[in-house]
Image (tube, rainbow, N blue to C red):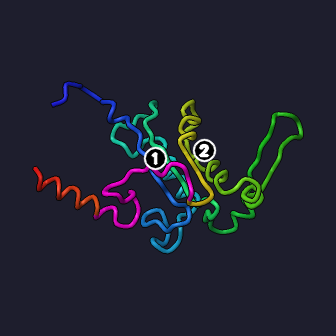
Amino acid sequence: MSQTIGLTKLAYSRVWHQISASAPHPTLSTQPNVTPPSLGRLASRIATILMGKHKPIWDPSTDCGDYVVVTNCAALHVTGRKMWQKTYYRHNTRPGSLRAVTMDVLMAKHGGAEILRKAVSGMLPKNRLRDKRLARLKAFESDAHPYKQNLLRFGGVQVGHQGWSEAVKAIREADSQRL
């Protein structure tokens, strides 16, 4: 029995999540297992994980979110004509310095990771925790990334990949037989 009343340090531990921007997702895609998730659906799920809203200890004033590694950002999926019509603005507070760039130009110049970062940034609350939360988003243009050892695994299978739920069931069954 725990001698601690309330939240423990284990509740605030951070987990690494891996999401592929090009692979079809069973719940985020509009056509499950056919098309990859669109930019907005992907960004809203990432923002939820970064804030920690998927945890039972979520509190808006504490930073209890997890890390998110997004791969294959070069193949971001957007619907309609957003790739050519969506405009990003920036301004340096000087008169006449408003600059506008479309999504396809921004993707060619900085890659899909920057577009995803801007979408997630717009979905996070505008407070002092925003930059810390956004720093836990690691976006990459391809499958290669340096955080492979940090990702959660069950029975050697990475969470979210094919067969990970069967590995969890096998581990739980072995534990129940052991006890």
113 lies above or below 126? below
Magenta-colored span: 144-166
Residue ID at (58%, 48%): 120
Magenta stretch containing residue 173, yes or no? no
What's the residue at 80%, 50% (across, down)? 100
The picture quadrant where one finds residue 83 is bottom right
Q: Residues within 10 Å of mark 1 (few under 14, many from 20)?
A: many
Q: CA distance from mark 1 to mark 2?
A: 13 Å
Q: Is residue 152 left or right of residue 178?
A: right
User: Circle 2 sits on which residue?
Assistant: 121
Labels 1 & 2 near each other (Cβ < 8 A)? no
Q: Mark 2, residues whose alpha carbon is within 10 Å: few (<14), some, or many (≥20)?
A: some
Q: Quadrant of residue 122?
A: top right
Q: At x 62% / y 65%, what residue is drawn?
A: 75
Judged from this view, the residue extending furthest toward the bottom is: 34
Q: Mark 1 highlights which residue? A: 49
